[in-house]
Structure formats: C-alpha cells, structure tokens
C-alpha cells in the first residue's frame, strides 16, 4: 500500500495563553512512502515523529494537509476504518487475557459481513503467531512472558487483521541491548515476509539505519532529509543530520577556509576547492582519520582503546567542539601508545564543511 502525505501539518494550542502561539509539532510534511517498504522516522524527542505516526493512524487529526492510502483520501477517516496495525512502545497488552485471546481481540470486533467464526479467528491467530514465532506460548498471559515475547504478541495482534499499513511507535525502547538487536532483526524479517508497508518510529539512529529502506530525519517538526540510510549518512544536507547520525558521533571543529584550503587551527588539513573563504564548521567522521607521520592534522593523544575488530584512538584538539576526538582505525593499525601526539591525514569523503551560522552544507571538490 502506497502512502502519500501532502503538506501535512499539526498544531497544538500553546499552554501559555498569554503567548498565544501554537506549537507546531509537524510542519508541512510532504512525502510518498513506496508500497511494501519499511520507513524509519528518526529524530530526537519532540521532533514530531510520533505525532506523524498518530496522524497516519487516525488517532489525531491534522491541522492542514492530506493523507492518502493508495488512491483513498483517509485524512478524515476514523482510526478504526483505516485498516492500520499499531504497535505501541509499552505493548498495551490485556493482562487478564492469554496470548491467544490478545491476538484474537481485534478480530472479535468485526461486525456484519466481516464477522468471523471462532474457528476462523483461531486459525488466523495461530498463523500470525507462527510468523512471529510465539505459537507455543498461546496459553500464557503477558505476565508470564519476557519483554521480547510481549513485543511479539503486540506485533501479532497488529498483523492478524492484515492491515494496509503497519505502524511501530518506538517498539524496542523497553528492551535490553541484546534483545533490541534480536527483535529489530525479527521486525525486518516479518516485514519482508508480509510485504506490508511499515513506518517505524525511533530516536535510535542505529535501529533506523539497520532495518529501514528509507529514513526520514526530523527536527522540530520539520523534515531535514529523506533517503536511503547509507546515502544520508554519507551525504548529510546539514550539520544537524551529520551530528545525529553515526556511532561514535561525528567530530566537529571550528575551522576556516582560506584560498581553497581547510584550516583547523593553524594547520591546512585538506584541499576544499570551490568552498568560499571564511569561518566554517568542519565535521569529520571517526573513520575519516588516517594516521601517518606526515599527516596535516596534529592532535594530542589521550589513549588507545583496542576493541578487537578495530582500534579507537582518543585524542583532543583545541578547535574541536567534542569533549574528545574519536578516530576509528583498523585493528592492524599501529599507534605508539607512549606518544604525546598523533598526526592524521583526512579522508576527503568523510569530511564535511558547513555554514557556521545556518548549519547548511557547503559543497567542495577535494583534489
């Protein structure tokens, strides 16, 4: 099911009546979600991603704009008639019902020509339970399940009615780290097997990048960038996107462009042909540092962390906004631990420069 958002806007009345200004949670959001894709809505708390999900589900009505499911305008259609499956952050299972009863519950509400027999509902519940691999837990109650199992029940309950789209509102935030990894892989498997168009809301950029076909990065209700996860990571349109994506985070420096050279401190660290002269903000991905004796960027070495598959070099520089610079190197790279400093060349494709005032990306050609 293709989903189209046209100039979608949601405003909430200000709690400060004297100020009189509305709070804009979603601001002029236009986007087409392709049929059968998994879309990650990504951003910090308060960016409008959950509000967007609630507008899609029908739990909230937009202040302006349109929502289409396929060719159908569902903007003013009640939530129960939209054919969506919604999985909440806290699972929202009925504690007094068994797993089977929880999964069947949405089917019991069907009326008229859509009403199903008990046998048919039971058959559909078991088919869905097998999809999420909980068919052996059907007689248990939620209190007897682990967090991951409860999440699977919630997903099964959303899927059993064969929704037109599946909406997931931060479904992994209550799970521990190992279970989060396992469950997000399961969500991707289930989405691929069912082919249901899915919108996945999260503030965790690693989750969004790992399972999404496309990610939508939001800030203060405004879409910052839309694209494939790797493309957005490699080609951020502004400083916010560059800083929000990446673990460890991008290293940010106060810098200056002079005659086609990027200066960090007093050192010309990279050729940036085409960039205008003046103060800029430079951002370097952790994997963009190449240690070498004649490197053009000199940093004070703090420590070296051996992580097995790679090595983290922790260092500092007076122009860096981060508390410490973290450079990620291959495990076979040799760094003299007793040194006071380390010199780096920079990988041009992992270096970005931005307007210091607006944060917008400044393009350049690396020689």
Image: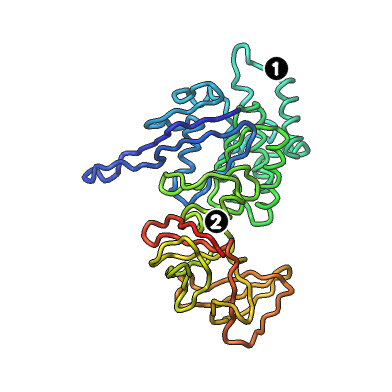
Is label 2 in a helix, a strand or a loop? Answer: loop
Q: Residue at x 71, y 29 (%)?
A: 125
Q: Quadrant of the N terminus?
A: top right
Q: Residue at x 76, y 39 (%)?
A: 133
Front-most of residues 171 and 7: 7
| Rendering quarter of residue 362 | bottom left
Q: Is residue 59 visible?
A: yes
Where residue 13 sits: x, y (%)? 31, 39
Q: Is residue 90 visible?
A: no
Where residue 317 sits: x, y (%)? 49, 77
Q: Residue at x 36, y 60 (%)?
A: 357
Front-most of residues 349 and 332: 349
Up-down: is 313 above or below 16?
below
- Of the two numbered discs 1 and 2 in the rendering, the one whose residue sits closer to the viewer: 2
User: Disc 1 vs disc 2: Cβ atoms closer than 8 Å?
Assistant: no
| Rendering quarter of residue 297 | bottom right
The answer to which of marks 1 and 2 sits earlier in the sequence is 1
Query: How packed is label 2: few (under 14 Cα within 10 Å), some, or many (20 or more)?
Result: many
Up-down: is 157 above or below 123?
below
Where residue 55 sits: x, y (%)? 47, 33
Write down the residue under mark 2.
245
**Residue lying at the far right of the rendered structure:** 136
Write down the residue under mark 1.
117
Q: How many marks?
A: 2
């Amino acid at each position: 099911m293709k989903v189209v958002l046209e100039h979608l806007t949601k405003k909430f009345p200000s709690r400060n009546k004297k100020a009189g200004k509305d709070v804009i949670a979603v601001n002029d959001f236009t986007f087409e979600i392709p049929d059968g894709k998994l879309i990650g809505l990504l951003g910090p708390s308060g960016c409008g991603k959950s509000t967007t999900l609630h507008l899609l589900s029908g739990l909230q009505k937009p202040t302006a704009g349109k929502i289409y499911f396929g060719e159908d305008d569902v903007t003013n259609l009640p939530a129960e008639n939209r054919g969506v499956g919604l999985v909440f952050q806290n699972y929202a299972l009925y504690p007094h019902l068994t797993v089977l009863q929880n999964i069947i519950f949405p089917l019991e509400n069907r009326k008229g020509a859509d009403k199903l027999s008990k046998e048919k509902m039971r058959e559909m519940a078991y088919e869905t339970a097998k999809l999420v691999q909980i068919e052996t837990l059907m007689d248990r109650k939620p209190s007897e399940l682990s967090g991951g199992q409860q999440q699977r029940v919630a997903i099964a309950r959303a899927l059993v009615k064969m929704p037109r789209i599946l909406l997931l509102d931060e479904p992994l935030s209550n799970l521990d780290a190992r279970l989060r990894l396992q469950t997000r892989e399961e969500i991707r498997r289930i989405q691929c097997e069912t082919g249901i168009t899915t919108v996945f809301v999260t503030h965790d950029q690693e989750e969004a990048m790992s399972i999404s076909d496309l990610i939508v990065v939001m800030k203060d209700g405004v879409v910052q960038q839309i694209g494939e996860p790797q493309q957005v990571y490699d080609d951020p349109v502004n400083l916010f996107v560059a800083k929000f994506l990446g673990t460890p985070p991008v290293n940010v420096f106060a810098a200056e462009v002079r005659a086609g050279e990027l200066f960090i401190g007093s050192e010309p660290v990279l050729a940036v042909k085409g960039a205008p002269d003046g103060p800029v903000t430079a951002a370097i991905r952790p994997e963009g540092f190449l240690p070498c004796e004649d490197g053009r960027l000199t940093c004070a070495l703090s420590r070296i962390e051996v992580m097995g598959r790679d090595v983290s070099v922790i260092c500092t520089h007076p122009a860096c906004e981060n508390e410490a610079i973290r450079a990620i190197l291959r495990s076979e790279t040799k760094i003299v631990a007793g040194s006071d400093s380390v010199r780096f060349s920079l990988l041009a494709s992992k270096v970005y420069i931005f307007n210091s005032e607006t944060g917008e990306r400044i393009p350049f050609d690396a020689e």
